[in-house]
Amino acid sequence: MTRMLIIGPPGSGKGTQAERISERLGVVAISTGDIFRANVKGETPLGVEAKKYMDNGDFVPDSVTNKMVRDRLNESDVENGFLLDGYPRTTAQVDYLDEILADGDEKLDVVLQLTADDEELVHRLLGRAKETGRSDDNEAVIRHRLDLYHEQTEAVVAKYADRGILTKVDGIGPIDEVTNRVMEAIKAAQAA
């Protein structure tokens, strides 16, 4: 059984690698973005509340995000493990996730951090924006998102590093190559 999370800056390939890890390990990949969209689409009370913030371009508050994640982690498909993508983003969310897992007498097995140079990520995201026609992905917005990532996640990464469950993997290179590095890192972390 594997309980893990994947952390990485925008454009590092988290979504792609999360799908591949999920398939190879037979665990469900849980993206907070997907949780938000499902709750908004289903017009759940939490979804209605989250939509107010999302429509304004604001971060959904921890209280709403935490409740959605707790509900999702209580579903039956996570019994054999899970891969969280996009949560926790703050140290307060780390503490809340610890509580959720402790309620089930569980803990995280590994935290995988995809690393990449900011300039490479800007180049990647600008290319992706061109391909998809996303007008919101201009260089200033991309750099702002990267700055937010660094501000928010450094403390989260440090917390998991202190626990000895953080594994860093270079996210730059061909997708299959990165996947091979990721799977080897997970295998090594589980053997430790």
Image (cartoon, helix red, strand yellow):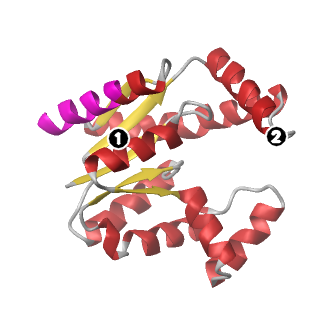
Given residues 79 and 19, the one toward you in this image is 19
Determine the residue located farthest toward the left in the rendered image. 191
Residues in magenta, as a range: 180-192
Residue at 19% x, 30% y: name it.
Answer: 188
Q: Position of residue 185 (x, y in %)?
A: 27, 29
159 sits left or right of 128 in the view: left
Q: Within 10 Å of the Cα at label 1, are there few (<14), some (14-19), or many (20+) other Cα atoms? A: many
User: Is the residue marked by circle 2 packed among few (<14), some (14-19), or many (20+) residues within 10 Å?
Assistant: few
Magenta span contains residue 189:
yes
Q: Residue shown at 39%/21% (left/top)? A: 177
Amino acid at circle 2: Arg
What is the C-alpha distance between the residues marked 2 and 1? Answer: 30 Å
- Classify mark 1: helix, strand or loop: strand
Instruction: Give residue 74's position: percent from left, percent from top.
Output: 36, 75
As helix, strand or loop, the secondary structure at mark 2 comes to: loop
Q: Up-down: is 56 above or below 167?
A: below
Q: Main secondary structure of the magenta part?
A: helix
Give the residue number, with chain letter if any, for mark 1. Answer: 111
Q: Which mark is residue 72?
A: none
The one nearer the camera, 103 or 143, is 143
Q: Position of residue 99 (x, y in %)?
A: 35, 65
Q: What is the number of the mark on residue 134?
A: 2
Question: Which residue is pictured at 77% across the width and 56% down the height?
Answer: 58
Label 2 or label 1, whichever lies nearer to me, is 2
Work out whether mark 2 precedes mark 1 in sequence or the reverse, and give the earlier one.
1
